C-alpha cells in the first residue's frame, strides 16, 4: 500500500471515528431533535465525501501504476 493510499485510509478511519463520537454525544445531548438530525446529516455527508475521495484516489493510483508498468514494458522491449 502506498503512502497516499495509507493517508486516505487513515482519513476515512478518522472520519468514521468522528462520526461514531458524534453519534455517541448526540445520544446524550439535550439538544433539539432538529439539531441532532442536522448533525447526523452533516456527518453522513462527510462520510460520503470521504468515501468518494478514497475511491477517486484509489482509481488514480491504479491508473498511475498501469501507466508505469506499461512504460517499463516499453523500455524492456526497446532494449
Image (tube, helix red, strand yellow):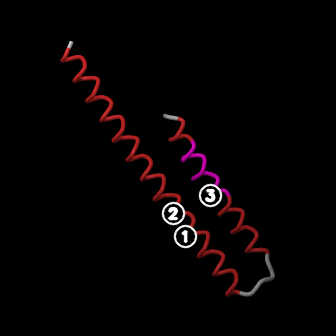
- Disc 3 to disc 1, C-alpha distance: 11 Å
* Residue sticking out furthest to the top: 79
Q: State which tag comes first along the sequence, 3 or 1.
A: 3
Residue at (46%, 59%) from the top-left corner? 52
- Identify the residue under disc 1: 45
Structural crowding at the residue carrying mark 3, measured as other residues with C-alpha within 10 Å and reported as few (<14), some (14–19) or many (≥20) = some
Q: Can residue 16 be found in the magenta stretch?
A: yes
Name the side, left or right, on which 63 lies relative to 53: left
Name the side, left or right, on which 74 lies relative to 18: left
Q: Do the numbered discs 1 and 2 sit on residues whose CB atoms are within 8 Å? A: yes
Find numbered disc 1 in the image and state the secondary structure of the residue it sits on: helix
- Identify the residue under disc 2: 49
What number is the disc on residue 22? none
**Residue 34: x %, y % from top left:** 67, 87
Q: Do the numbered discs 3 and 1 sit on residues whose CB atoms are within 8 Å? A: no
Find numbered disc 2 in the image and state the secondary structure of the residue it sits on: helix
Name the side, left or right, on which 71 lies relative to 51: left
Find numbered disc 3 in the image and state the secondary structure of the residue it sits on: helix
What number is the disc on residue 15? 3
**Residue 21: x %, y % from top left:** 72, 62
Which region of the structure is painted magenta?
7-17
* Quadrant that contains the C terminus: top left
Relative to 5, say whether 34 is above or below: below
Q: State which tag comes first along the sequence, 2 or 3.
A: 3
Q: Quadrant of residue 64?
A: top left
Residue at (42%, 53%) from the top-left corner? 56
Amino acid at each position: 500500500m502506498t503512502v497516499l493510499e495509507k493517508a486516505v485510509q487513515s482519513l476515512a478511519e478518522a472520519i468514521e471515528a468522528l462520526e461514531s463520537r458524534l453519534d455517541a454525544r448526540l445520544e446524550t445531548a439535550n439538544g433539539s431533535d432538529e439539531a441532532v438530525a442536522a448533525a447526523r446529516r452533516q456527518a453522513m455527508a462527510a462520510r460520503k465525501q470521504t468515501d468518494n475521495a478514497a475511491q477517486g484516489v484509489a482509481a488514480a493510483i491504479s491508473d498511475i501504476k498501469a501507466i508505469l508498468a506499461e512504460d517499463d514494458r516499453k523500455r524492456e522491449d526497446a532494449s
